[in-house]
Image (cartoon, rainbow, N blue to C red):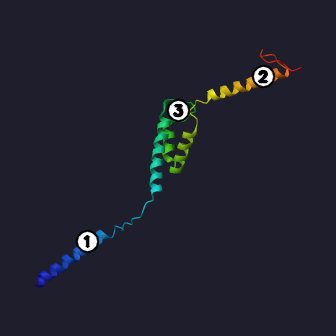
Amino acid sequence: MGIIRNKARFVSMLMASLMFLIAVPYQPIFAAMVATDITLESERAQQSREELKQFVAREDIETYFIAQGIDPLEIKARIDALTDAEVIAVADRIEQLPAGGDAIGVIVGAALIVFLVLLITDIMGYTDVFPFVKAQK
């Protein structure tokens, strides 16, 4: 009986030591609630990052950056280095910019201003551009 007890003591000490060695390196895990807005913001940042990369990958944009002496790979690395808030701000700014169709509005506005100036000068008698306007004397 003594032999079994001595061997059991040795085995129990060995098992206790192994259990202690296994349990020590691991820290307890603390769970916390994650707010919905933080999760959505992280998802939106990832989506904005992908949109920026697609925007930069366009051929005309890439050609413009190369003409400016900027390597497209460096641009992608910089996009990856932006914080989530910066990526969202840049993507929002790009979405707010006009889509390039404003030239017609500028041309129509300029033509309207030129017409009004010529009409007023015709009415005042300085010019004679429009035959339907009778100058004041």
Vertical order, 118 against 27 (above or below):
above
Q: Residue furthest right?
A: 137
Camera-side residue of 107 and 71: 107
Mark-to-mark CA distance, 2 and 3 = 43 Å
Disc 1 is placed on an element classified as helix
Query: Within 10 Å of the Cα at label 3, are there few (<14), some (14-19), or many (20+) other Cα atoms?
Result: few
Are the residues flagged by discs 2 and 1 in contact, CB closer than 8 Å?
A: no
- Image coords of residue 80 (percent x, y): 48, 45
Disc 2 is placed on an element classified as helix
Residue 70 in which image quadrant: top right
- Image coords of residue 91 (percent x, y): 53, 43
Mark-to-mark CA distance, 3 and 1 = 61 Å
Q: Nearer the viewer, mark 2 or mark 3?
A: 2
Query: Within 10 Å of the Cα at label 1, are there few (<14), some (14-19), or many (20+) other Cα atoms?
Result: few
- Where, quadrant-wise, is the N terminus in this rendering? bottom left
Residue under pointer 3: 61
Vertical order, 117 against 15 (above or below):
above
Residue under pointer 1: 18
Residue under pointer 2: 119
Left or right of residue 10: residue 62:
right
Q: Indicate the amino acid at tag 3.
A: Ile
* Residue drawn at 55 percent across, 46 percent down: 89
